[in-house]
Image (cartoon, rainbow, N blue to C red):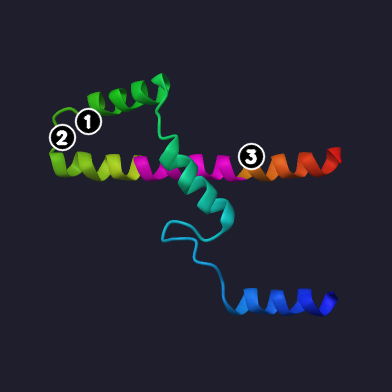
Amino acid sequence: MNEYVAVLRKYSKENPPNYGSDAHSILEMLFVYYHECNNTDTDAVKAAFEDLYQRMHGMPLREMDRIVDAVCTLCREHEKAGFLEGVKVGIQLEQEII
């Protein structure tokens, strides 16, 4: 059995899975699909973006786009980090219970 597992590990290392362009691990892939299916903003998030747009009032559109793109990237990375750590904590908790 150990030889079989060794062969599978070698094959897996030589032929890594394709997680898609937005992920580098199974956990990241789970987040990508979770986010696609649950992409709903809370009232607090909507209010924060409204505040951001109010503060940018009068700025050139190109500058506004640059800022909003950076804010959205930051928000997505923060949400992804929280999701990944939450899954890890959940797995650890499940292992401790058993």
Disc 1 is placed on an element classified as loop
Image quarter of the C terminus: top right
Q: Earlier in the sequence, mark 2 or mark 3?
A: 2
In the picture provided, is 64 more to the left or to the right than 43? Answer: left
Q: Mark 2 touching mark 1, by CB under 8 A?
A: yes
Measure the alpha-carbon separation of dots 2 and 3.
Answer: 38 Å
Disc 2: which residue: 59
Residue tagged 3? 86
Residue at the image point whose x is 41% and y is 42% from the top:
36
- Side of 41 where 88 appears, left or right: right
Q: Nearer the viewer, residue 69 or 42?
A: 42
The residue lying at 76 percent from left, 44 percent from top is: 92
- Find residue 62 and report its image quarter: top left
Amino acid tagged 3: Gly
Using the image, determine if residue 93 lies above or below residue 23: above
In the rendered image, residue 3, in percent from the top left (x then y), is placed at: 81, 80
Disc 1 target residue: 56
61 sits to left or right of 18: left
Magenta stretch in the rendered image: 72-84
State the CA–CA distance, disc 2 to disc 1. Answer: 6 Å
